[in-house]
Image (spheres, helix red, strand yellow):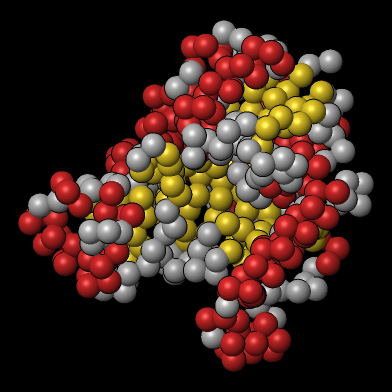
Amino acid sequence: MDRILVLDGEARSALAVVRSLGRQGLELAVAAAEPPALAQRSRYAQRRFACPAPARAPKAFQEWLLRAVEGYRPHLLLPLTDLSLALALELEAELRARTVLPFVDRATCARVQSKGELLALASSLGVRVPRSLRLPPLALQSAEHARALDAFAYPAALKPEVTQSRIGDGYARLPVAYPRDAAAARALLAAGSPYALVATLLQQRIEGPGVGVFALCADGEALALFAHRRLLEKPPTGGVSALSESLPLARAPVACAERLLAALRWQGAAMLEFKQDRDGSFHLLEINPRFWGSLQLAIDSGRDFPALLYQLFRSGEPLRGEKRERFREALPPLLEGRRLRWLLGTLDHALIRLRADPLEALAGILLRNQLRLFERPLATRLEVLRATDPAPFLGELRAWLAALAARGSRA
């Protein structure tokens, strides 16, 4: 039986991976900085490892990772966040000599994790991107940068150029901010702000729905595809999906995604995030070079990406020739219109809105059903709560209630 080492056990994508590969009869070890984490509670997680937190102690995490791979000897290693993947790829030669790492190489990963470089590539390939202004850290900004900041069209979105930004000896994930005007943007980038310490992108704010295109690739060829749209997000201004719905591929920017993945000679899983503007056009925001938060929706819709990834890269190299064709032909039908609800994410979405504007939030939730409760119940499944594997949800609920009580005591 092959062993799989799954990192980032705190992530919902890790839970989806563990459930998928556990059903394949594989031996699964799950690592997390603070066990027992979400995926470690699954009945399919046969071993639990405690590891240093990648963001707080990246060097210690890398040292632990080398020891864990040497000691546990997994057949496959699966980092599930941008940071853990980037840190693993810094050890690419050592890890690939000991296990299968079914992802892009370090250079390609760095290229797409730099949003400015990725958007420049996409634009050169005819893929629409938001209007963007690249800004260096405050200490390196010039008068020309200040003029460009003032001249930019607002409202806008301000985000780090790299999602996990290096600050001091660790990494921080800075949220996307939404300045309404140049004065607000300057305040966000002023001395003392964390945004002033890193390279940032100021972007056109596109108000439409988020649409994701997901792919499993070998040598730049997309062998399995899936698409969804976000119906609710946490936070409501834009973030991770709390309710999502599978889309027909014809209603998603699949051709743009395939063009980019071919140009990058992509290997493994990819999530391409787009925003759809009012005119129906799609604008690329980023590529995530690993599994994504709403992975369970793809699995529920007939695209079991973790199991497919294992099949495709089990030998260390992707299937080629006739084996690749048989792999593609064996894909089951894609189910459209399926929905996935992250229950506690939906509650957080509601609480954020209630704190910001109680009357408007109540009207939207109770009168306009903006949480989309009880819509299409037969097509909707809960992401974390599953009858055959309830322990992850019970652990998540306990942690959520404890955090809610702590916030209440500080208020």
In the image, 120: left or right of 285? left
Residue 101's spot in the image, x, y percent?
A: 59, 20
Looking at the image, is 72 positioned above or below residue 182?
A: above
Q: In this view, does 263 lie to the left or right of 253?
A: left
From this viewpoint, is residue 323 visible? no
Q: Residue 1, located in which quarter of the rendered image? A: top right
Q: Residue at x 87, y 25 (%)?
A: 25
Q: Where is residue 79 in the image (x, y as percent from the top left)?
A: 60, 31
Q: Which residue is drawn at 56% across and 50% down?
A: 212
Q: What residue occupies the far right of the structure in this picture?
A: 388
Residue 74 in sight in this render: yes
Give the residue at the far front of this rendering.
Answer: 409
Residue 175 image point, x, y percent: 44, 57
Return the residue found at the far left.
Answer: 143
Question: For this view, does 228 lie left or right of residue 296?
Answer: left
Q: Is residue 155 above or below residue 214?
A: below
Q: Left of 146 or right of it: where is 5?
A: right
Which quarter of the rendering shows the C terminus?
A: bottom right
Provide residue 328's location: percent of width, then percent of height: 70, 27
Q: How many labels does the image show?
A: 0
What's the residue at 59%, 91% (across, down)? 359
Please tell me which residue lies in front, 265 or 321: 265
Residue 326 quadrant: top right
Identity of the residue drawn at 45% across and 22% down: 90
